[in-house]
Image (cartoon, rainbow, N blue to C red):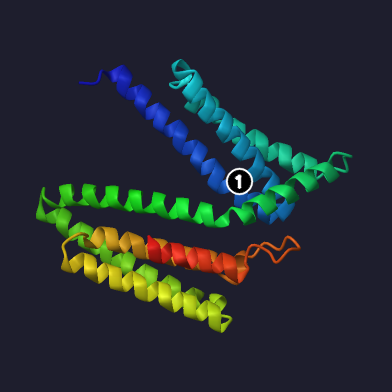
Amino acid sequence: MSTPSQLIWSVLSSAARLTTVSSILLFLPLTLSALSPPAFLLLSLLSTIHSLIHSTLRLVLPTLAPVLPFLQVPVHPFLLLFSFNLFSSTSSLVPWLFEAAKLWGKALRLWTPVFVWMEGMASVIVVQATGRTGRVLAERSEEWQVGLLVGAASAYVASATWIVWCYSSIATTPLSSTLLGVALTALIFLTLIGFAQRRTNVIESSLLALYFAYSVWLCSDEHIIDDGHGGYGSEAYWASWVGAGAVA
């Protein structure tokens, strides 16, 4: 049984990790909106380097693992201020930073299929873990069953509404419309097979529907970042995202 001090330490560590993740999710779109795509790409590059250093320290120096979540909390705010300062000034380093951001953007575009596959697999793992937790909770009482059913139904409705709302933005060509239809059909078909064979439940299927709607939303025109080489909103990028929604 955990002692009070261990419990407090666990809560603080979890809060530190949550703060770091929230900072990443907030600062990247903030940089893209307030500055420019090159600044967004530079902050992404710096965050990636920090993650590599953080993971390496956890592997090489496991004794530092308990304090690393706290040490990385101020890193992302510092990187955000660093990016804002550099791209808001007329420093001679700015051309080099633009070039670094440009190269990083090219690397991200080339590795997009790999990233999409990794995100799809990670999403499936999270959905399966959530589904198992939901089954355990549903066995406790009928209140949990009703609550989970209401939550799953809400997720279904939200996903359908989200897809309909994004449809006019993504279905701009016959190819993109076809890809969207194929992915949606595959998602429904696989969901029905899972229900028929009792390999899935409404919690997992509703979360997958949300992930599919999220993927479609990211493929919409309003999320294109034009880097002068076709942008990240090209049909190849759209196809990879929509395909990820179907595979997941």
Q: Quadrant of the rendered structure where residue 198 is?
A: bottom left
Q: Position of residue 242 (x, y in %)?
A: 47, 67
The answer, for residue 35, to whether it is visible in the render is no
Question: In screen coordinates, is 22 left or right of 158?
Answer: right
Foreground residue, 41 or 145?
41
Q: Position of residue 46 (x, y in %)?
A: 66, 38
At a point 40% along the width and 49% down the height, the residue shown is 122
Q: Quadrant of the rendered structure where residue 149 is?
A: bottom left
- Among all residues in the image, which is located at the extreme bottom? 174
Foreground residue, 248 or 47?
248
How many labels sit on residues?
1
Element assignment for label 1: helix
Position of 68 relative to 219 (above/below):
above
Position of 171 relative to 218 (above/below):
below
Q: Position of residue 164 (x, y in %)?
A: 44, 77
Q: Quadrant of the rendered structure where residue 89 is?
A: top right
Q: Amino acid at mark 1?
A: Phe
* Residue that carries the numbered disc 1 in the rendered image: 27
At a point 50% along the width and 43% down the height, the residue shown is 22
Question: In screen coordinates, is 191 left or right of 76?
Answer: left
- Among all residues in the image, which is located at the extreme top? 63
Question: In screen coordinates, is 104 left or right of 175?
Answer: right
Q: Residues within 10 Å of mark 1 (few under 14, many from 20)?
A: some
Q: Position of residue 181 (x, y in %)?
A: 43, 78
The quadrant the N terminus occupies is top left
The quadrant the C terminus occupies is bottom left
The answer, for residue 39, to whether it is visible in the render is yes
At a point 69% along the width and 48% down the height, the residue shown is 104
